[in-house]
Image: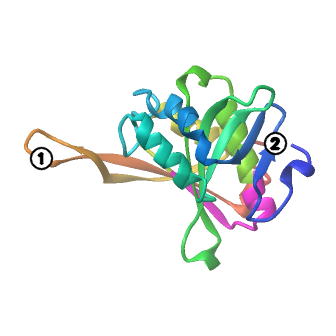
Amino acid sequence: MTSADLAGSPSTTTVGTDRLLLRRFTPDDGARLYAILSRPEAVEFEPYGVETRARCDELAAARAQDPSFWAVCLRDEGTLVGIVYLHHDDPREWRGHTLGYVFHPDHWHQGYATEACRALLDVCFLLWGAHRVCAHCDPRNEASWRLLERLGLRREGRLRQAASFSTDDAGHPVWHDAYLYAVLDTEWGRAGD
């Protein structure tokens, strides 16, 4: 990543790496978003199910207005391969952020998620002055927690029955645990060393 690729402030609209361009969503990204969110394996551990094309059009329009969402595109061809979520948490003066991501299954195991998240975390810590970035993931999602560990986040705990994204036949919540990962600004420069 070059300094030109880190241009900006919290209003940064693009971030580049050798292989990727991270940009803000546009209202025209519905079809590209649908290519990811229509895949059951992509959303298996997300709090929503497979999305329809119409819903992806709505999501693209909403995400175009939300600076927490980043479209991850292949630099050379512009193909949307993933979504990274980097939200500035409240209270804002604590300078905390939450990280999340979903990538197209056809582009798994190529290092794109690691590259995209690392680039955004660089921006978050080095330019935006973040103090702490955290992420949650389902313990069954080994690929996700291994990604967080590659990025240098440490597992801080296991939250017992912390979330429910579905119900059983009787309408009762089906609870699952969540891992909590985090990295501090004082650690980020050493992450991955």
Residue 127, image quadrant: bottom right
Q: Which residue is mark 2?
A: 16
The residue at 47%/48% (across/down) is 58
Residue 185 is a magenta residue: no
The residue at 47%/41% (across/down) is 56
Q: Earlier in the sequence, mark 2 or mark 1?
A: 2
Of 109 and 9, the residue lying toward us: 9
Residue 4 on image: x %, y %: 92, 50
The residue at 61%/42% (across/down) is 28
Residue 172 on image: x %, y %: 13, 49
Residue 158 on image: x %, y %: 41, 51
Locate residue 162 relative to residue 53 in the image: left or right: left
The residue at 64%/63% (across/down) is 132
Residue 96, image quadrant: bottom right
Locate residue 186 relative to residue 52 in the image: left or right: right
Locate residue 87 relative to residue 73 in the image: left or right: left
| Circle on res. 154 | none
Q: Which residue is mark 1?
A: 171
Q: Is residue 80 above or below residue 47?
A: above
Q: Amino acid at mark 1?
A: Gly
Magenta residues? 122-135
Do we see residue 181 in this rendering?
no
**CA–CA distance between discs 2 and 1?**
45 Å
Quarter holding the C terminus is top right
Quarter holding the N terminus is top right
Q: Which residue of the protein is positioned furthest toward the right in this rendering? A: 3
What element does badge 2 sit on? strand
Locate residue 108 relative to residue 185 in the image: left or right: left
Residue 70 on image: x %, y %: 64, 48
Of 141 and 84, the residue lying toward us: 84
Q: Look at the image and name its color scheme.
A: rainbow
Q: Is residue 114 above or below residue 188?
A: above
